[in-house]
Image: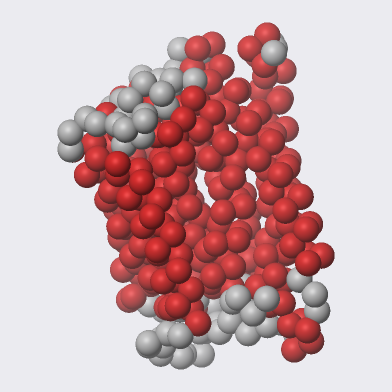
Amino acid sequence: MIADLSTPLLMAVFALAGVVVVLASIKATELADIIADRSRMGEAMAGGIILGGATSLSGIVVSVNVAANGDASFAFSNAVGGIAAQTLFLAIADFLHKRANLEHAAAEPANLFQAVMLLVLLSLPIAAMAGPDMAYFGVHPVSVVLFLAYIAGVRLSSTVSERPMWRPVLTHETRQDVPEAAQEADKPVLGPALQFAALVAVMGGCGLVIAHVGQDFTTRFGLASSLVGSLITAVVTSLPELVTTLTAVRRGALQLAIGGIIGGNTFDTLFLVFSDAAYREGSLYHAVGMSDLYWLATGLLMTTILLAGLILRQKDGPARIGIESVLMIAVYATAVGVELTAGS
């Protein structure tokens, strides 16, 4: 039905789905902060698991849907392109936090560990692509390893959050994760959790619409799947991460902002697991091209820079943002330039 729409109407549907996802994510951020306080989970863990997974749902629907339709490059580039875009959003958020570098103010051991976990998870697809072309029941063994590594990493992240073996040096600019009100922890969590679940369902439905429109873009305008996946659907489905990050920074929930991005990115690696299972023509990792690998390398590089910034904790930098933010912007801009040149 979407393929029968006129081009202006198709664009309108695409924009509407994106707007609904963004609006739902704004409310989801507020609810995630409340859930973090009432459940005593903490902002970093709530951002990494609850908010990160929820805002990634529309993206995973896109990747799985196009993989099931046989477009491996679209599915792969949507996943890894989203990781790069979402990491860029932290650099944008750094502009908003004027008092000090965001990575300095939001020092949190759980975020450091999740960044390390993300590097591990992103390295596994490279191993799969470089290794033999194999698939059992249509699934590459690395997909199973990636899924198990994610589950193990989440459990270890929880341990790091609850019983940290070290703590960051506190400065005047360090924002600690303290509930906004002492009585907040005594309130029930069920109500906010149900509202949060409803918003997740809405974002998932919009993701399905975005997937169908994105596939129509590739045929109607003759665009490369990697270009549409990495720079169109990946960015649109990543807008919730941008909105939730900016909203969290404005609310002062800095750990939630960084945890939401890093946690969302670790969850996004599962796009590849589910896409590999949905892709019925063999191993997903051996059906993609060098452009897709380039975006994976971009995500790895940007995550490494972010991790270095979290460890360095620079207070001030160029244009009142951290040097890691400047570098992440430069890396992403270079990747976009390369993609546009290759796709032209």
Q: Nearer the viewer, residue 137 or 92?
A: 137
The number of callouts visible is 0
In this view, 137 is above or below 193: above
Residue 53, picture quadrant: bottom right
The furthest residue to the front: 137
Q: Note whether residue 82 is visible.
A: yes
Residue found at x 72% / y 32%: 16
Residue 20, percent from left and from top? 73, 41
Residue 10, picture quadrant: top right
Quadrant assignment for the N terminus? top right
Residue 159, percent from left and from top? 45, 77
Q: How is the image coloured?
A: secondary structure
Side of 207 where 145 appears, left or right: left
Residue found at x 67% / y 16%: 2
Residue found at x 46% / y 12%: 222
Q: Note whether residue 87 is visible.
A: no
Q: Nearer the viewer, residue 157 or 26?
A: 157
Side of 208 where 226 appears, left or right: left
Q: Nearer the viewer, residue 33 or 197?
A: 197
In this view, 103 is above or below 234: below
Residue 94, percent from left and from top? 50, 65
Q: Nearer the viewer, residue 15 or 82?
A: 82
Residue 36, percent from left and from top? 65, 73
In this view, 76 is above or below 194: above
Residue found at x 43% / y 78%: 160
In this view, 23 is above or below 325: above
Residue 344, picture quadrant: top left
